[in-house]
Image (tube, rainbow, N blue to C red):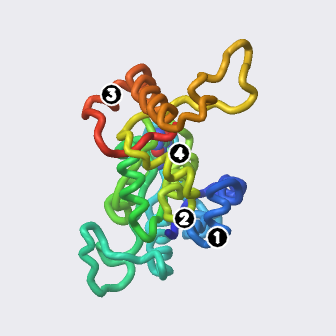
Amino acid sequence: MRIQVLTIFPELFGPFLATSLVGRAIARGLLAVEVRDLRDFAEDRHRSVDDEPYGGGGGMVMMAPPWIRAVRALMAAGGEGDEGGEGGGATAGAAGSPGFGPWRVLLSPQGARLDDAKVRELAARRGLILLCGRYEGIDERVRQTVVDEEVSIGDYVLSGGELPAMVLIEALSRQVPGVVGQAESVAQDSFRGGLLDHPHYTRPPVVEGLAVPAVLLSGDHAAIRRWRGEEAVRATRAKRPDLLEGGVGPGRVLDC
Ligand code: 4GX
């Protein structure tokens, strides 16, 4: 999977992309992430990307032309990230024509909330362009011309789309085949549907007077499996009863 990021703070991504699972996925060629400075697509010698809002009011608004130029340039340099558009209606056509090229996602509090289903859906695409805005917002015509979808990571206000983009990249990377190891992905995809994870323990056996549940030391693997299933349901009922509403069917444990 190929992900291109547009931001005025590319330096925020350095250590994130070099570390842990994401870093390893990139080093192994399973994931390609390219971070581009939006200012490289500005039209003046000051490399301006923001201006005062029409109609007045406080704050600054990101101008449309740098975004439009940037996204079109990344689409033209598409290569491997190109794919058909929504519904797979791929037709021969120049990069930049509608429905062709990487899927373009604007991180914003006005987007649909990111969840496991959305992560899987986006992970199925070959190429993504992530647009990270700053300031009070972005000229509406950016949405109208070069954005396929808006995604939010939650109902709170951040100062920019960079952290949401990193959240999305980390979640996406876990869905790329080969990134998460066999043992972990078995735990992640077990048949206890849509439940929170069971509690975990490691050495030492007693911490602050709290002992590890005896069943985990019993060596009885069927009993351990049963206990973990019961604890997953218990944790879900206590912390996230909304997840139980659809009933417990085949699906996935939410690994948290
Ligand atoms: N989940 N923000 C983006 C600037 C902005 C505003 C409008 C585009 C359109 C956020 C979130 C979030 C703050 C990131 C405003 N860019 N993004 N930024 N929550 O709060 O995704």
Q: Position of residue 67 (x, y in %)?
A: 47, 64
Q: Amino acid at mark 1?
A: Arg
Secondary structure category for the residue under label 1: loop
Q: Badge 1 local density, few (<14 within 10 Å), some, or many (20+)?
A: few
Alpha carbon of mark 3 to alpha carbon of mark 1: how far? 38 Å
Q: Which residue bears the numbered disc 1?
A: 28
Alpha carbon of mark 3 to alpha carbon of mark 4: how far? 35 Å
- In the picture, the disc for residue 135 is 4
Horizontally, residue 196 falls left or right of residue 173, namely left
Q: Amino acid at mark 3?
A: Asp
Callouts 2 and 1 close, C-beta under 8 Å? yes
Q: Position of residue 140 (x, y in %)?
A: 36, 54
- In the picture, the disc for residue 178 is 2
| Residue visible at 26% across and 33% down in the picture | 247
Q: Position of residue 174 (x, y in %)?
A: 52, 55
Callouts 2 and 3 close, C-beta under 8 Å? no
Alpha carbon of mark 2 to alpha carbon of mark 3: how far? 31 Å
Q: Earlier in the sequence, mark 3 or mark 1?
A: 1
Q: Which residue bears the numbered disc 3?
A: 242
Q: Earlier in the sequence, mark 4 or mark 2?
A: 4
